[in-house]
């Protein structure tokens, strides 16, 4: 690998446009580069297209026009094996989406065993390690129905990490949580950021954005309006951003 | 709130009502001067009468030192050989005519009702397996991304659900059965599987669609392909949700299997009809047949309940 490819952004979204089949124009020419190890936080009002954009990055949502390059692989190429790309791109959902028929351990082990063809023993060692890292050493045999929201979300993070991804996408990971559980999930995410994981995070947690983000992006009505480092972002006097921040804070 | 004592009162009341109903049946029998002969039923379930073994041709009896009886036919051909018997009626060297009794075999055999029950169980079980296969295929086609698959599945389901099973049995037997040269039993299995498969397909579709879309998204975002996500994430959850309606459908299958007697398959119902005319005990026969169906359906719903309990470990 040359220096050039090393420094090239790991995510390159170019003029991404998305219109849903029902005619809803959710993304309008959104371009964004994310460098290796960078943490980018996306904020914006409800319905502004944050989730849609995030989900185009692992092709849970197809795009109408534009191009997305993940670690040198063009997603819109017909020759691209999207399942391979998704192994590299972990995703954490607002509603956790744990597999209810599997224990915490089973949730984390499933994909490495079925997709990466790891043996049960290999997968289990790794899964135990990850669950311990997110603070759930005592809860490995619990089914999701026996875990609190915060615990479920931490299992979901461990499950995504089990595929050893290069990028992690978070779609409002703390929005469905009771306030007292938000901290435990954000702490895990901060830990990941410190270890140099490339992260794109949609969140309403401005504290997290200020503390952890390398860049903050503001979206509104399908457009990317503002893209700044946190210091300048929250000082900028952009009228639409101010209106939004006025509502959130 | 139900208290302990009111529950016992309820049980007592229930027993009383059941006793009244049963004696009602008994006394209505008396009113029409019906004499109950339950003992006449036994030979039709387990037959303990000695069985006569008859000569198939005219010939001479030969009994060798091992006791094997054989008949040398008068007009050539293969000898008839009888190895299993309890008492001999014919002697070595006897001249025998076709239809004469040679020997007697004691022991027990299943009677027509037991054999009919076995046919019903076999028919239902094989049809159940095939209906699950058909239901899975068409249920998955029903939610496929391809229009042609969805259209095919909808057509199958609507045609089958919109026509009576009895008519389908006739069509399968007389049309498809003749074209492909199917025997009665195969035709019966085919008709029952195709019929039940349509309902299973709808249950499977509803079960899969009842799994939140987030499950598929989570599985796919972890790098699983569609088939892996279906097998390891969606189906295990869908099956759990579909067990209660499936149980109902399979119980219907067992009961519907009685309709195949119209194409002369001797299942439990047909056996019942035949036994009624031989035994002159219609009430006993039909009550027994009903009880046997109840045992089979009861066993099935019990088995499914056990399965449900085992799958509910994650609740
Ligand atoms: N599956 C869909 N089909 C049609 N329209 C959709 C679909 N999903 C989202 N949309 C529309 O696309 C627009 C962007 O939605 P999106 O979910 O990306 O917003 P968001 O910024 O994530 O909002 P929130 O903060 O509420 O999660 C909205 O107008 C929404 O109604
Ligand atoms: Mg959203």
Image (cartoon, coloured by chain):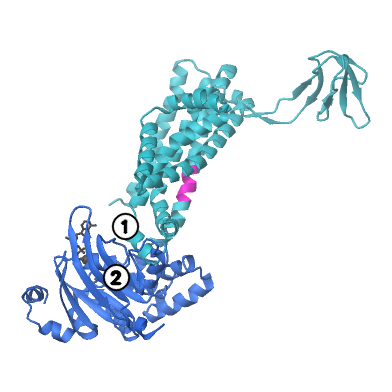
Q: Quadrant of ligand 1?
A: bottom left
Residue B113 figure quarter: top right
Q: Is residue A214 visible?
A: yes
- Residue A230: percent from left, percent from top: 18, 84
Front residue of A113/B106: it is A113
> Label for residue A149?
2
Per the rendered image, the range of residues in magenta is B300-306
Q: Residue at x 44, y 37 (%)?
A: B196
Above or below, B95 against A137 in this view is: above
Whether disc 1's CB lies below 8 Å from ligand 1 is answered no
Element under disc 2: helix
User: Disc 1 sits on a residue from what chain?
Assistant: B
- Residue A57: percent from left, percent from top: 30, 68
Q: Which residue is mark 1?
A: B213
Q: Is residue A60 magenta?
A: no
Front residue of A144/B301: it is A144
Above or below, A45 against B9 in this view is: below
Residue A47 horizontal side relative to residue A68, left or right: left
Q: Residue at x 56, y 31 (%)?
A: B186
Front residue of A238/B52: it is A238
Residue A35 figure quarter: bottom left
Element under disc 1: helix
Residue A40 horizontal side relative to residue B119, left or right: left
Which color was chain A given?
blue
Give the chain ID for the cyan colour.
B
Above or below, A202 against B232 in this view is: below
């Amino acid at each position: 690998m040359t220096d050039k490819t090393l420094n090239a952004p790991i995510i390159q979204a170019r003029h991404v446009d998305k219109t849903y089949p029902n005619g809803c124009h959710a993304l309008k020419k959104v371009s964004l580069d994310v460098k290796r190890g960078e943490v980018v936080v996306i904020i914006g009002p409800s319905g502004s297209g944050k989730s849609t954009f995030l989900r185009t990055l692992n092709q849970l949502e197809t795009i109408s026009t534009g191009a997305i390059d993940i670690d040198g692989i063009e997603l819109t190429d017909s020759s691209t094996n999207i399942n391979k790309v998704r192994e590299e791109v972990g995703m954490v959902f607002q509603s956790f989406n744990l597999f209810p028929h599997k224990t915490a351990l089973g949730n984390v082990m499933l994909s490495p065993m079925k997709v990466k063809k790891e043996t049960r023993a290999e997968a289990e060692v790794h899964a135990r390690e990850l669950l311990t890292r997110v603070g759930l050493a005592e809860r490995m045999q619990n089914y999701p129905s026996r875990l609190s929201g915060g615990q479920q979300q931490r299992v979901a993070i461990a499950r995504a990490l089990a595929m050893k991804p290069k990028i992690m996408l978070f779609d409002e990971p703390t929005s469905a949580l009771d306030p007292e559980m938000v901290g435990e999930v954000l702490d895990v995410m901060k830990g990941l950021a410190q270890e140099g994981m490339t992260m794109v995070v949609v969140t309403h947690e401005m504290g997290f954005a200020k503390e952890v983000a390398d860049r903050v992006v503001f979206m509104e009505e399908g457009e990317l309006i503002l893209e700044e480092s946190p210091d300048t972002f929250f000082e900028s006097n952009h009228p639409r951003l101010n209106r939004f921040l006025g509502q959130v804070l | 709130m139900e208290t302990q004592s009111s529950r016992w009162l309820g049980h007592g009341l229930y027993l009383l009502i059941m006793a009244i109903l049963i004696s009602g049946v008994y006394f209505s029998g008396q009113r029409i001067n019906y004499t109950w002969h339950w003992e006449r039923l036994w030979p039709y379930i387990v037959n303990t009468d000695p069985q006569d073994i008859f000569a198939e041709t005219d010939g001479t009896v030969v009994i060798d030192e091992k006791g094997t009886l054989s008949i040398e036919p008068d007009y050539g051909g293969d000898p008839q050989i009888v190895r299993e018997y309890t008492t001999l009626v014919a002697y070595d060297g006897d001249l025998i005519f076709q239809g004469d009794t040679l020997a007697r075999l004691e022991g027990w055999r299943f009677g027509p009702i037991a054999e009919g029950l076995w046919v019903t169980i076999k028919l239902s079980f094989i049809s159940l397996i095939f209906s699950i296969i058909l239901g899975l295929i068409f249920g998955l086609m029903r939610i496929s991304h391809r229009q042609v698959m969805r259209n095919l599945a909808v057509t199958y389901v609507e045609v089958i659900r919109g026509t009576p099973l009895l008519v389908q049995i006739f069509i399968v037997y007389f049309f498809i059965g003749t074209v492909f040269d199917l025997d009665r039993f195969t035709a019966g299995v085919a008709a029952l599987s195709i019929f039940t498969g349509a309902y299973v397909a709808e249950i499977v579709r509803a079960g899969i669609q009842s799994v939140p879309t987030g499950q598929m998204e989570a599985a796919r975002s972890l790098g699983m392909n569609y088939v892996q996500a279906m097998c390891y994430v969606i189906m295990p959850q869908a099956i759990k949700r579909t067990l209660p309606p499936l149980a109902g459908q399979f119980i219907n299958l067992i009961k519907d299997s009685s309709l195949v007697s119209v194409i002369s398959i001797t299942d439990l119902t047909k056996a019942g009809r035949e036994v009624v005319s031989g035994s002159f005990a219609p009430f006993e026969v039909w009550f027994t047949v009903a009880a046997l169906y109840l045992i089979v359906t009861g066993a099935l719903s019990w088995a499914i309940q056990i399965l449900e309990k085992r799958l509910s470990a994650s609740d």
